[in-house]
Image (tube, coloured by chain):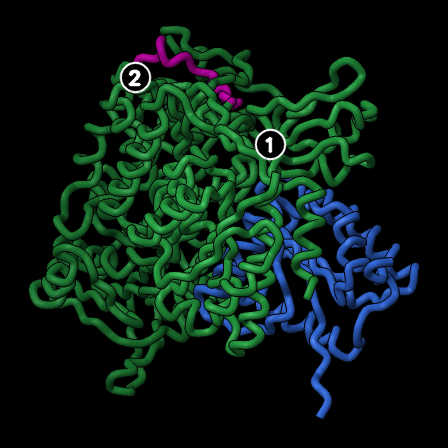
Chain colours: A green, B blue
Amino acid sequence: MKKRTGIFICHCGINIAGTVDVKSVAAEMAKEPGVAHSVDYVYMCSDPGQNMIEQAIKDKKLDSVVVACCSPNLHETTFRNAAKRAGINSFKCEIANIREQCSWVHKDKGKATHKAAHLTKSAVKKVQKNESLEPISVPVTRKALVIGGGISGIQSALDLAGAGYKVILVERSPSIGGHMSQLSETFPTLDCSQCILTPKMVEVSRHPNIKLMTYSEVQEVTGYVGNFKVKILKKPTYVDPAKCNLCDECTKVCPIVVPNEFDVGLTGRRAIYIPFPQAIPASYTLDDKNCPDPFTTIACGKCADVCKVKAINYDMKPEIIEEEVGAIIVATGFDLYDKENMAEYGYGKYADVLDGLQFERLCSASGPTQGKILRPSDHKEPKEVVFIQCSGSRDPELHCAYCSKICCMYTAKHAMLYKHHVHDGQAYIFYIDVRSGGKGYEEFVQRAVEEDGVIYLRGKVSKIFEENGKIKVWGVDTLSGKPIEIDADMVVLAQAMRPSNGAQELAKKLKLGTDKDGFLAEAHPKLRPVESVTSGMFLAGAAQAPKDIPEAVAQASGAASKAIGILSQERLYHSPTVAKVLKNLCTGCGMCVAVCPYDAIAFKDGKVEVNEVLCEGCGTCSATCLRAAIQVKNLTQNQVQEMILACLGG
Amino acid sequence: MTEEFEPKIVAFLCKWCSSAGSDLAGVSRMEYPANVIPIQVMCSGSVSPLYIFEAFNRGADGVLVSGCHPGDCHYIKGNMYARRKLLLVKKLLEHVGLEPQRFRMSWVSAAEGQKYTQVIKELVKELKPLGPQTKLRRERNG
């Protein structure tokens, strides 16, 4: 039967028509074999434009259409739906990308027009050989996995659980709470961080829909949207949380002391420990990286001896738990930029040079000094404190090129908290710019200056060194042009935020993209900020970019609602452009079976067979088969060869 | 005045990285020569060696295959197969006497509009002095 293809060339205002002679492309396409209709229009994606396509399909009895317009990532769905409404299969519509890949990147009208004609012709050749296909439907596992138990993960888990879905919340450390649990107060309200966080933590532990897995890590994820299979490694805590009554006798006898992560190394903890009093789950963990200590091979057994309820079991083994989920939210958070990288500020060298999180612990009522601000070196009250913003941020030459976003605000908060604790003290802040966009943020910074007399100095610090028990800070005030020298008692660095340690490896396991700085990549920077590039996986919190608590919580709720969008479906639809086997050509050699990244091809009766649900349509099999016996539907070798010819002809 | 030789180049771009990268070049209005006609494939791993021979047979002066960076493949490891296979194709093409510049592989991510532009500019620049590719061209009607 003779083909009847319709061509629709979009002007996109002047976006395309400014560089491509759309009328001549339409006229040239009209001469192509099988083309029954070829027109141009100012905005194909507008309602009249879509109606024009639908009407032409009906009036001219078109059996396929090509729309030459913007990238298929934008309007492919629009035009395929229009084709469907007019009664032809949605796969009988193809897009020729003559905007992003042509009109926007070329200036010479003749050459751009020539290229646009080739692109359109190539799409015509493809569409004329497209099969009519219907989406493959798959069931949905109505359960979600949330990775990371900081505020973002907690919020996502609670939202999902509240909507009635089962959630598995995986956290690698012994307690949920994340960095927010370490904070003293939060800007701009000066709310006590733990007071607003711990109710949510308790809710997580008590919610019937949430299965909390702390001290656990995601090891492997396979499957696809709606049907992921997850392997989770549950590390042994050697303490049975059901028996532990938190008597704290074990830590009194444990002989091993290591730096306390919760206090960012300002204090020590035992090898058996509870991270902080409000930890969820409320139980102790015996850290087997430190017990037994590296010089002994057998645990001393003192903790088990004093444990009256016999909660300690040295024979606990790592377990692999397998779960099935329909959607995954990744909320792996941040870590501070490595202190080793900031040698110029004496960080790690001088005891009284701290990072922001350490200063939070000093301010915190539950911290190592019970909320008294004291120098770690001699436990004296510092009378002059220098805060340095952008420590590692906004420095493309040496450190991180990006702005860590939250430091301007928390430094203002730190300076303010310091003044609230040490009334006769003086706080100085070195800054490049003060970025205080956000509700109540600018007013907060003003309050630090006006009420608490914080001195802001615009400039970078050049050197920090110890002299006569003081920390000398050399810098320059770029507004007055004068060099500044401060004899400080303490220096606090607003370290840059980095993706959390191990986030990169996890991203690889989940097949998530990352950006140039290692943060998880969103599907679209403006319009799809909580979706990842992998369907069914969503991003929340600082894992995606530096952000403060309100933003992290907002994104976490956004991610949860996106996940609910999947979990609330009866079935999901999977693209039908999958591989198919031409049985008469297949010899059963199995090369395609070996290369398939999804194990979607299996042997059957001496030949192979494709599992259409598992197949993602990548086509690696087709490029491997020596006999062209396995092909991806609607992008067969024959179609590609026709497209090559169309690209080169004329 | 003789017109400057304009090489005809076919580019196989994977949908997820390189085609998206070339879209980004468009969105960012980066300019590059119009010699390359892209064909979007799902994965660089789906580019059969036959496609490359076919393109040269049909008169391409150059062929580009571009995919996600090794390790970043949308389909886990398709680009690894592409790399292994296409390196052999490259050797074979050179063995039969084709100039090595005529066939190129590149890794361009969805965030690398600038890199895509650079790859195209370089390719066109390298191919111009070589003139038309006749070694593998099959005569029409023949």
Q: Chain of mark 1?
A: A
Q: Residue furthest top?
A: A309
Q: Magenta residues, as a range?
A: A229-245
Q: Quadrant of residue A557?
A: top left
Kindly identify the residue that appears in the image at 32 percent across and 62 percent down: A491
Placement of A559 over or under B94, stated as above or below: above
Viewport quadrant of the N terminus of chain A: top right
Q: Main secondary structure of the magenta part?
A: loop
Q: Is residue A443 visible?
A: yes
Coordinates of residue A28 in the picture (x, y in percent): 56, 64
Coordinates of residue A509 in the picture (x, y in percent): 55, 35
Viewport quadrant of the C terminus of chain A: bottom right
Task: Verify whether residue A253 appears in magenta.
Answer: no
Circle number at residue A209: 2
Q: Which is more foreground, mark 2 or mark 1? A: 1
Circle number at residue A578: 1
> Is A120 situated left or right of A607 in this image?
left
Between A570 and A26, the residue placed more toward the observer is A26
The disc labelled 1 sits on which kind of residue?
A: Val
> Is A549 situated left or right of A416 in this image?
right
